[in-house]
Amino acid sequence: MFYRQSGIHHTRYAATRKLWPLAADRRLLGGLLALALLAPLLLPELYLNSYLAPWLIWTAAALSLTLLMGIAGQLHFGFAAVMAIGAYTSIHLARAGVPFELALVGAGLAAALIGCVFGAAALRVKGLYLVMATLAMQYLVSWVIINVPAISGGAQATLATPEVRLLFIPLDGDTALYYTALGWTLSCTLLLLNIKRSSVGRALVAVRDKDFAAAVIGVDPLRYKLLAFFTSSFLGGVSGAILAFCYYQAVTPEQFGFNVSIQLVAMVLVGGLGSVIGAYLGAGFILLLPIVLTNLLAWVAGLELFPVSFNLIAHIPLMVYGALIIAVILFEPLGLAKIYDNIRKYFLVWPFRHAQR
Amino acid sequence: MDIAFLIELTINGALTGLMYGLVALGIVLIYKSSGVPNLAQGAMVMIAAYLVWMVAGWLGAPVVVALLVAVLGMFLFGMLTERVLLRRMVGQPIIMVVMLTLGLESLLRGLGPGLLGAAPKSLDLGIDMMPIIVGDVFINREYLIGGAIGALMIGLALFFFRTRLGTKLLAVSDDHVSSWSVGISVERAVAVSWGLAGVAAVAAGVMWGSVQGVDWSLTTLLFPAVAVVILGGLDSIHGVLVAGLVVGILGSVVPGYVDPLVGGGTRDVVTSLIILLTILFRPHGIFGREEIERV
Amino acid sequence: MKKTWLSGLLGACSALALGASLANVPDKEPVRFALLQDFTAVYTFLTNEYNQGQQDYLRLVNARGGLDGHPVEALVRDTANEPQRGIEAYNRARGEGAVLVDFLSTPVSRAAVNRVLEDEVVMITPLHGRGDASHGETFPFVFPMMATYWSQAAILADYIDTELGGLAGKRIALVHIDSPFGREPVPVLETLAERHGFELRAFAYPSPGTEQSATWSDVRRYRPDQVLIWGAGSGQQVSVREAIRNGIRPEHILSVVWLAEADAEHLGKHMTGVKRYEAVAPGRELPVIQAILDEVVAKGEGSGPEENVGSSYYNIGVATMAVAVEAARLALAEYGAPLTGDTLRRGFEQISNFDAEGLMPPLSFSATDHQGGGFGRVSRWDGGAWVPVTEWRSAYQDIVWDEIEKDAAGFRDGR
């Protein structure tokens, strides 16, 4: 009913290859885009700068990781380190007077180059061993950042982001920061949507499904694995820089620790491995769930219905968070994206369920 | 060069390495039988330590009773985890299994400190704090006992694989389908290995809990344990013994000499490098079985 | 669609929460202090007691009629030491009218410094955060309010100099956790080493500090006359344990502020003689703590287990709120209601010689000095309690302020 399929005739190949062949999907997306663009007018400041902006930036990071984990099938448990390299590079470049646009590119390149070193492990091993190797690299990068004051910013280990301009617009105030984040996330989204239907994307998928088999059909796994690490780390590095400039505004080593890497992997998996909409849903879930739960529980505790220690209340979000990750993986291994897809499919033929193929 | 310094670093390192081995043992037992890399083992160690503290420190029972309760409790907990969570994951990609254990880790991280209090608890086993002094070498009694228990547990695990049940477990670790075909209950074998991992977690939790106190930071033992497991081979009990010693000794000797030069705690660097170099040059570890992949 | 749905839900939740808190509005607008702390991660070793002390003191203030009729309301949230959760909690609290925040987490407060300066909200960073925030002109809204780590190192060194036989010619070992916090005292001690001619060597152990044996084997061979231990949480008792095991007498161990009753309980008899810096007096005999016991805890209004009352970290919590309430009182008297971040800051800067009836050293703040003079004392564990061995004192503030100026200058050009 909402998603009317009747009357849609694809008479040209270009029409079938559209990203969104259904008019209803396009309208929905247009609506969402309009809402996202109008968000600074519609949303209270709190939800703009503490929910929507970080959600978008983490989505960009999750999308970068989706490219690597979901499309190319290379597991990565050190992505926060890649983002850290981007964040620190961009700040140091911007402080040295490099224009912000170039600093972003520099951040991406630095992250991509070091990210390829991570990738070197992927040429040798895969699966669990790759998880462990990237984990070890995460620790190494964190150690270097903490122990080299020239990188982390002296005795206080804090680097504030300098004032910069992006395309001649000064980057300050919630609105400017929000639009920058939105622009970057949308770029990542479009890139990912399109990479999936390019020859490169299909080659990556072939490598993911079985690298030996890909080699047999003439896809060089070595080249494509490195390409995946390079591209994904580039995007991750820029996302790290955007995170530093548009959200934290002061970077410390803890912002890119091991637990952040785990959170990013959780975003990709809980959202749905390889799905673009999944990255949005997963990032929202992992990032905002503890925050929402904390506030909800504080409100419930404020009612004083039953006596319970604050220690327990503070730990409940952690338990629920763990339990929900387990639940998603057990009951819907394809993630939140699949749940969305199920709902969409249901409405595609609603109310004529029997018509579903 | 001060030779006594080197000997002391080596001995204390070897003993801590064996104590890391206690954590690693649980991971290996589970991986060996079911191919599941249990990244929640650190959290299981923490839960075991909380359990012992709850019975001994809070309810005031003798330590022996607490140990028995904890062993039983963790054995059941391990079996239950396998039955409720991991059995449903058979056939899923490895990354899903890894994430599931990480979700479990988060759940346990909330559960233990949430219910029993997040402030560090002390777990006193009555071990004399004064070291054993041999010449100019000081040996830490707690580590000595911990290391001995580590070696003992690894020895018991080795012995266990020579028993009837252990032989079944070996068969299961070789091949699930052929085990089924000769009438071995793969499910039961896997469940038992989880239970045993729970028991190993009690040993690790008690020893580390007495050294550093019981709180969430016990979960950070996972990292050195992962190094032990990777170096020794994911499915090798011998590997735990040898790799535990190597990781412990390198993690003590190298920082002992390098730290003063770079002015930082380099042990995590050593641990990371052990993981990385092992994976780059011998991914299946010293004793691990090489997997053969077919298209 | 999803975005608006979610934010709608969130909005509804917060509206409900606000409604709930407005339901018991007394005659005057409440003063809101946001205690957005880490209850679940790195700082768990003290957060529960510290926060309990803060809340109990605010309840005492309210039981006595509030601040000039304004009740003081504590907004308590867990941030899990994660900057993004801290920032959300901060923005929410600010929306609800909080005029003061206390994160009790170095990473979160570092990430929040620029925001509080911009939003004109007072941030107190007692015993955490960046020490250079003592520089009032650079950080008008940040108050470390107790001795920075630099001042603590200076006091401990001064104590060794005056009462443990002098510094000249001695070997001092600084055994610290390998983190920016652990390295913080190094420059002050290095300057002192030059000035007094003693030998200083820093030993780092890896974070989180649960296994330090290799480091201490090295420390023992250095044969130090005095050892300063600089860590936090369970790493501290591991340090003391390893020190004693390596033949260092307890009397020669001096600790940063993070050593408390729980660590002593863990170590038993071996702990006797270990000394620490303390910023706030522990114990129940103090008038403020007695008042809390009589007027809050005895009525069943306490915010946590009674046995915590009077512990070191509990009393630190009480002290932070005593200072904050005093500042609010001065601000309300001088500038009247409503209390804003800016008037509260001015209130802080008017505090002079405030010691909360002997709970802490007399603190005085000014527009330039947000540290309050860098006072503290050394106390010794006598087997059952921490007993002070010196009067309240401060030391080498010239050196400390050189560091403060240097780092504050760094902050001004963007660090």
Image: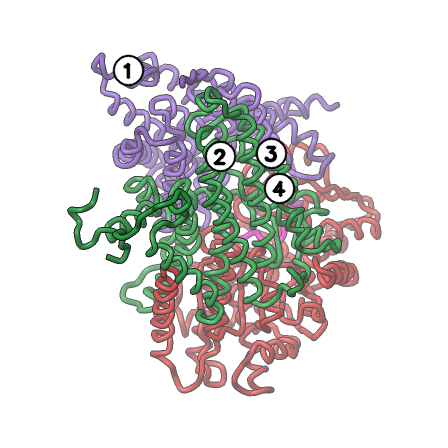
Write down the colour of chain A: green
Circles 4 and 3: CB atoms closer than 8 Å: no
**Marks 1 and 2, Cα distance to the nearest angstrom?**
48 Å
* Residue at the image position 29 percent from the left and 36 percent from the top: B85
Circle 1 residues within 10 Å: few <14, some 14–19, many ≥20: many
Q: Is residue B293 above or below residue B82?
A: above
Circles 1 and 3: CB atoms closer than 8 Å: no
**Marks 4 and 3, Cα distance to the nearest angstrom?**
8 Å
User: Which residue matches tag 1?
Assistant: B168
* Residue at the image position 56 percent from the left and 28 percent from the top: A223
* Residue at the image position 48 percent from the left and 49 percent from the top: A189
Q: In this view, does B53 lie above or below B203?
A: below
User: Which residue matches tag 2?
Assistant: A199
Residue A105, given in percent of the width and then of the height, sits at 65, 48
Residue A205, given in percent of the width and then of the height, sits at 44, 32
Q: Quadrant of residue C339?
A: bottom right
Chain that is purple in the image: B
Circles 3 and 2: CB atoms closer than 8 Å: no
User: Which residue matches tag 4?
Assistant: A111
